[in-house]
Amino acid sequence: MGLDVDIKPLIERIRNGDRQAFGQVVIFYQGPLFGFLGRLGLNQSHAEEIAQETFLQAWKRLGSYDPHLAAFSTWLFTIARNLALT
């Protein structure tokens, strides 16, 4: 699907203090994330809650993201999956 094609420059901008770049990450991933949460069986309102919390957690934990260990989408969707399961 190519979700991580242009994400690395955005991650660097965020790490360098560009808060607006995170908004672009949200716009880029919100559709695929909602689809993923729907496939997990969540209704729309629950998916919206989980998506919002996912992006909040990603913002807080961005310093722990290591692009050598996983694609950003894998890291983000793992946060979403873990939140959906709890």
Image (spheres, rainbow, N blue to C red):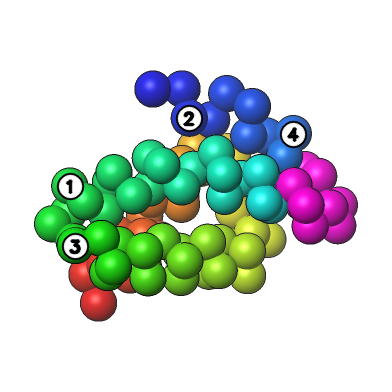
Q: Residues within 10 Å of mark 1 (few under 14, many from 20)?
A: few
Residue furthest to the left: 41
For discs 2 and 1, the disc positioned in front in the rendered view: 1
Q: Is residue 66 left or right of residue 51?
A: right
Residue matched to label 4: 9
Q: What's the residue type where badge 1 is placed? A: Arg
- Which residue sits at x=41%, y=42%? 31
- Which residue sits at x=13%, y=57%? 41
Q: What's the residue type where badge 2 is placed? A: Leu
Mark 2 or 3, nearer chain start: 2
Relative depth, front residue between 37 and 11: 37
Q: Which residues are magenta?
A: 12-21
Question: Do the CB atoms of the residues marked 2 and 4 lie less than 8 Å apart?
Answer: no
Where disc 4 sits, the SS reads: helix
Q: What's the residue type where badge 4 is placed? A: Pro
Residue matched to label 3: 43
Mark 2 or 4, nearer chain start: 2
Measured in 3D between alpha carbons, the distance from the residue under mark 2 to the one under mark 1, in whole angstroms, is 17 Å
Q: Is residue 84 left or right of residue 61?
A: left
Residue matched to label 2: 3
Residue 35 sits above or below residue 3 on the image: below
The picture quadrant where one finds residue 82 is bottom left
